[in-house]
Amino acid sequence: MCGIVGYIGHRDAYPIIIKGLQRLEYRGYDSAGIALFDGSDINLSKTKGKVEHLKKKAEESMSLKGGLGIGHTRWATHGIPNDENSHPHISNSGDLVIVHNGIIENYESIKKELTKRGYNFHSDTDTEVLVNLIEEVKKKEDVKLGHAVQIALSEVVGAYAIAIIDRNKPDEIVVAKLGSPLAIGVGENEFFVASDASPFIEYTNNAVYLADEEMAIVRLGKEIKLRKIKDDAIAYPNIMELKLNIEEIEKGGYDHFMLKEIYEQPRAILDTYRGRLNVDQGLIKMAGIDDNLERFMNADRIIIVACGTSWHAGLVAEYIFEDLARIPVEVEYASEFRYRNPVITDKDVVIAISQSGETADTLAAIKLAKANGAFVFGVCNVVGSSIARETDAGAYTHAGPEIGVASTKAFTTQITVLTLVALKLAKEKGVFPESKYHEFLIELESIPSKVERALESNALVEIIAEVYKNATNCLYLGRGYNFPVALEGALKLKEISYIHAEGYPAAEMKHGPIALIDEQMPVFVIATKKGHYDKVVSNIQEIKSRKGKIIAIVTEGDSQVKELADHVIEVPETIESLTPLLTTIPLQLLSYHIAVMRGCNVDQPRNLAKSVTVE
Ligand code: M6R
């Protein structure tokens, strides 16, 4: 949560920081702030609300000059979103200014101690406590800022990515990281600091990603110096060349990132299997699996850990792994797994799924699994993210940046990667008939064009959205491979349109939810030809007898459900295991249109943030 940006160099810092904050707004958008050194002092502006508000306020009220600055866009943890709690925070002397992403868990006790020593606090945040702790250490120990940061951070418990500047030393920014991401962009005699590379990608492709418990002093005219916070060991920065380009992080003519990302799915799925799937040779090449085949072949079971949409992709993967590769799978909410003393052995393979690669609970679940000897395989989208680095091996989804808070292409590309893994293991184990395997590869290769066809339902989906946009509750039903799609459809509607929605396995309806059905209740049913079609048709009959409104996702050419449903949306035919890649498309479009019609902020829904880097 929260986005941080910093700049030091020969350009004006203000436009770089403001634009950078706008790109990072997906991380949190309760409030925003900026601090700039104008050559003699630090000027600061901060406000509740979006970066746009900050821009207006800063341009009206402060000098925008200077080649050194830091900025922040916030997702509140300690203290409500208001001007005082917004970052940057200033130390009591006015010398130090900090931006922080994360949580300092022991801030109360530190605050008490600092209060006794005469410090005053103007906000309810843990961050203001941290900047004053650094100030206190700096004075007491008579050390430079970098050293003070190091000592202070050894005293705190929690997670952080920080950038801090000192008005008496305006040629440097000190940064540090534990648990929250931080990248340093390395330009020609200039440096950028940010929560991800998007704020600086148009200036430089060279970046250093800080590892946990590392800090750096980014000083003009000097090379970056990395240090371990705890033991002071010097680390050498690994400067990576980034492949990201600016078009990928802009809206490209779409009204919202979410819509752009929905439409990117044919390309994203293709990029996911490109270079891995070779239909002619009947091969799947994945270095992360090939290099660790023994671990997978000897695994007693696979445990999947994830949160939110990634957890739904994990549920689809459970069906695929058990069905194709005959490996037992358990799918766990990372947040539960990490705290419930699970039985994990060195015969387990844990697959951690995360778009951002920064989700705190998933990261903690990985650490727990590793500590118990399990082999951990990551499925991430963000290259170089904490989870990608923490896992023993992995496969990137190559979906490209996902900016909309509601995950769309992350879901379909995660399923694609996991399908490749399952198919590869099925073949290695010899448990999947060769002819079916080949048919599967051909079908998988055709998915991008079938997703294109599923996207053609957009105009119809918009009409259906108009009919149900004022619903207060919705049910989503699916069976087998499409049960997780029902959960995902409900989550999409809830998070961006604020309509209450629940997903269920269709057959569970009789065990309770059917009581909710009346003529007001829209029920979205996934009823594709493959799988438990007849049984789902019976469920549809039951809804109809109770006057529920039925919106069915069916296979092209279906006539039986058409007779019963109020609306049908067709998707192309495919093999059952691949249906989630198609049935999810109209449900994504539906939530998008309903949210737009209700005037909701589609890309930045209330109370949410793109990556949940705190518990
Ligand atoms: O980055 P991750 O995949 O680890 O994120 C997990 C969830 O926070 C995420 O999927 C969330 O549920 C989305 N807002 C759903 O659209």
Image (tube, helix red, strand yellow):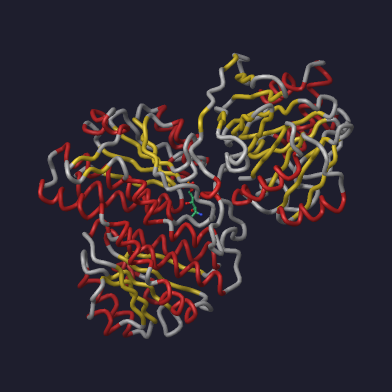
Identify whether 522 is placed above or below 595: below
Residue 364 seen in this snapshot: no
The N terminus, quarter of image: top right
Identify whether 575 is placed above or below 11: below
Give the quadrant of residue 450: bottom left
The C terminus, quarter of image: top right
Q: Residue at x 65, y 20 (%)?
A: 223
The total number of labels drawn is 0
- Judge left or right: residue 558 versus residue 136: left
- Judge left or right: residue 441 versus residue 153: left
Q: Residue at x 86, y 47 (%)?
A: 62
Identify whether 475 is placed above or below 50: below
> Toward the viewer: 247 or 395?
247
Across and down, in percent, residue 74 comes to 68, 48
Across and down, in percent, residue 45 comes to 82, 47
Across and down, in percent, residue 183 comes to 59, 33
- Judge left or right: residue 356 versus residue 20: left
Across and down, in percent, residue 151 comes to 70, 20
Residue 24 seen in this snapshot: yes
Give the quadrant of residue 286: top left
- Judge left or right: residue 18 versus residue 514: right
> Toward the viewer: 202 or 591?
202
Q: Residue at x 27, y 67 (%)?
A: 572
Q: Residue at x 85, y 30 (%)?
A: 95
